[in-house]
Structure formats: structure tokens, C-alpha cells
Image: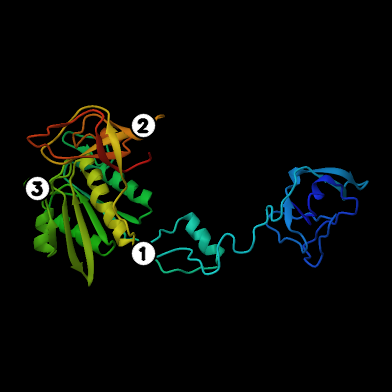
Amino acid sequence: MLPIQASGLLLARMYFEKYIYEWDGQLEKTVTSGFCMRINTGAPVPNGADAVVQVEDTELVEASVDGKTEIQIRILKFPTVGQDIRPVGSDIEKGQEVLSVGQRLGPSELGLLATVGVTTVQCYSLPTVGVLSTGNELVEPNVPLTEGKIRDSNRTVLLAQLKKLGVPSVDLGIARDSPDTLLQKLSDAMDMVDIVVTTGGVSMGDKDYLKQVLLVDLKAKIHFARVLMKPGKPTTFATLEHKGKTKIVFGLPGNPVSSIVTCHLYLVPAIRKMSGCPNPLGTVIKVKVDRDLILDPRPEYHRASLTWDADDATPTAHTTGNQISSRLLSMSCASVLMMLPASSPGASHIPKGALVDALVIGPV
């Protein structure tokens, strides 16, 4: 970069016929008309200079014999006063608020704190979340299947989702369908985590012990245990006191799709709220449906991917196919959950091209 002392319109038309100093960072040297000094990007502007010319906008006319010293240059583009000079305070004004309460500290925010010399700030701590699967039928993903067994995918999905959010998590393993086993697993978890997320054991079967253990053994308060929605009807939410601290329990359904959908709808907003986020709910956008959709008696969260037409700013939502709650393939490539209303006598379907709300759950 070449800081120069501009002199009306003459500067762009004349040669510098006097010696050009190689600026050594000493600000006491002064740039006068007909002279320039070479500086690097980000360096202080020398005294007397009021513009900077990028070196690619100059042409070397004469140099010393050894080529180390520039004697004459031609400026190819007429400079203006203040060109490529960043005045003090142009990026952050004196007294300007850099960050506000509730902002998430990402890379840029941390960089701003470094810029203003702030190395310690008061933050919300992220909750630690434990993930527990329940069911006699479950085996670890690396175990060969035998009759009546299925591999546990729920922990893999939920732990990956927590990692994506940057939330500390604990793998609590698999609890067999036994009140004593479940109680031991939950009791051990309370010493390690702030939130326990279970999958399975919350429906109406004779092996669904979660509610019993929470109410009877852990003296928890169950705030709700059934929700009018599809998928995720048996979702359960409870709180309890453990060693003077409030612990949260989310009992999510065992079906893989139900567990990840209710994770997005309940667990993720709860984590954001506990982390100080002022807007814990996810982003909702308008989308066009790509086909006629039959409505369910319950409000439905329908998995879909998005595409955009060049001449339309509203994306089109493409269903991911069969929406049964055991089909995890319906979550693959899904970037939104279309929020479909319950059917009614006057409305049994959503017509192709209609606009509906959609909760963003993945890259769009």
C-alpha cells in the first residue's frame, strides 16, 4: 500500500522525481507533495499522508541498480482524500454497544470481544443432557440381531443432535424393562446431568414403567404425559428435586421418528431457554406443498425437503415419503417439519401449492 500526499489533480498525472522512502514504521517521517512511503496493510498512516494507493494501481518507472529501492512510480488511478484509510473508530465507535445480553457467542462475537480487549464475560452455562434408551428388545448397533431384537438408533440420533448443538451430553446406555433397573439408571443419571432424555417406556403397555418410577420412586411432578400431535403422542415431561437441584426429564416415544421430532419440538427449545436464548423456538417459514396432503385427526409434523424455483422466493416442500413413525428414512434429507393442522369436517386435506408453516430443522 502506498500512502501519498495528494495535491489536487496533479498527483495522478505527474512522476515522483524525488527519492521514495522505504517507510520503516517511524511516524515522525512526513509525507509531502511529490513523495510517498510504502506501508503494509493495517499499518498506521504516516504523518502528512491523506490517501492510500494500492500497489497494484501503481507502475514502477525506475528502481535502483540492485532493484531493492524504488525511485519513480506512476500512479495509474487517481486517488481521493481518505482513500483506503480506516479512521480510528470507523469499525467500532467510542461508547458503542458491541454485544448485548442474550447473544450467542459464536466466532464473530468472540472476535469482537477480542477486538475490544474483553477476555472475561458472564455467560449462561449449557445444561448437560443424558440420553437413555429403554426396552428389552434393544441391542447396541454393533451387535448381531437375533429374533425379537432391534438395534438401538435413538441414542445415536439424539446424541448426534446434541453434539450438533454444542451441548455436553452423556450416553446413559440401555435400560431393561424393569422398574428397579430404570430407577437405578435414572438415579445414577441425576448425579451427572441436568436433563435426562429417555426414549420408550412412555406408552400404555404393561412394560412402560417410566411414569410409575418418576411418580412413585423419584417423587417427580409430571407436567404432561400425552400430547395431541403426530408423531409423538406419548411425550412426557417431568421435573424433580435431586440433592437440592431441579432436574428435568423428557420421556420421548420409542419410535425413531417420534423421538427425533419431539426432540426438535421440546428438548431443543428447552436447552436454548436454559442457555439464555431470548428466542428459544425454532425458525418457522412459509412453504408450498408439492402435492395434495391428507390431514390427520391430530396436528401433524410432516417431514419434507425444500427446493426453490428461480422466479419464486417461496420454497416448495417435498414430502419424504411414508410418514410412519418407525421409518427413520423419512427424516433423511428432511430440512423442515411441515406443521399441518388437524382435519376437520370442512377441511380434510391440504391442496397442492397451498402455503403452510414449516419448522426448519436442517440445512436449507
CB atoms of marks 1 and 3 within 8 Å = no
Residue 153: x, y in percent? 26, 41
Within 10 Å of disc 3 (Cα), the crowding (few <14, some 14-19, many 20+) is: some
Vertical arrangement, residue 332 with respect to residue 35, above or below: above
- Closer to the eye: label 3 or 2: 2
The front one of 55 and 165 is 55
> Which badge, 3 or 2, is on the more N-terminal residue?
3
Q: Is residue 242 left or right of residue 156?
A: left
Within 10 Å of disc 2 (Cα), the crowding (few <14, some 14-19, many 20+) is: few
Residue 22: x, y in percent? 83, 56
What amino acid is labelled 1 in the image?
Answer: Ser
Within 10 Å of disc 1 (Cα), the crowding (few <14, some 14-19, many 20+) is: few
- Closer to the eye: label 1 or 3: 1
**Residue drawn where x is 21% and y is 68% of the image:** 242
* Screen quadrant of the C terminus: top left
The front one of 184 and 84 is 84
> Which badge, 1 or 2, is on the more N-terminal residue?
1
In the picture, the disc for residue 307 is 2
Residue at disc 2, secondary structure: strand
Residue at disc 1, secondary structure: loop
What amino acid is labelled 3 in the image?
Answer: Lys
Q: Is residue 277 left or right of residue 199?
A: right
**Residue drawn where x is 33% and y is 61% of the image:** 275
> Which badge, 1 or 3, is on the more N-terminal residue?
1
In the picture, the disc for residue 125 is 1
Q: Label 3: which residue?
A: 207
Residue 6: x, y in percent? 78, 55
Residue at disc 3, secondary structure: loop
In the picture, the disc for residue 208 is none
Q: CA distance from mark 1 to mark 2?
A: 37 Å
Residue 348: x, y in percent? 12, 32
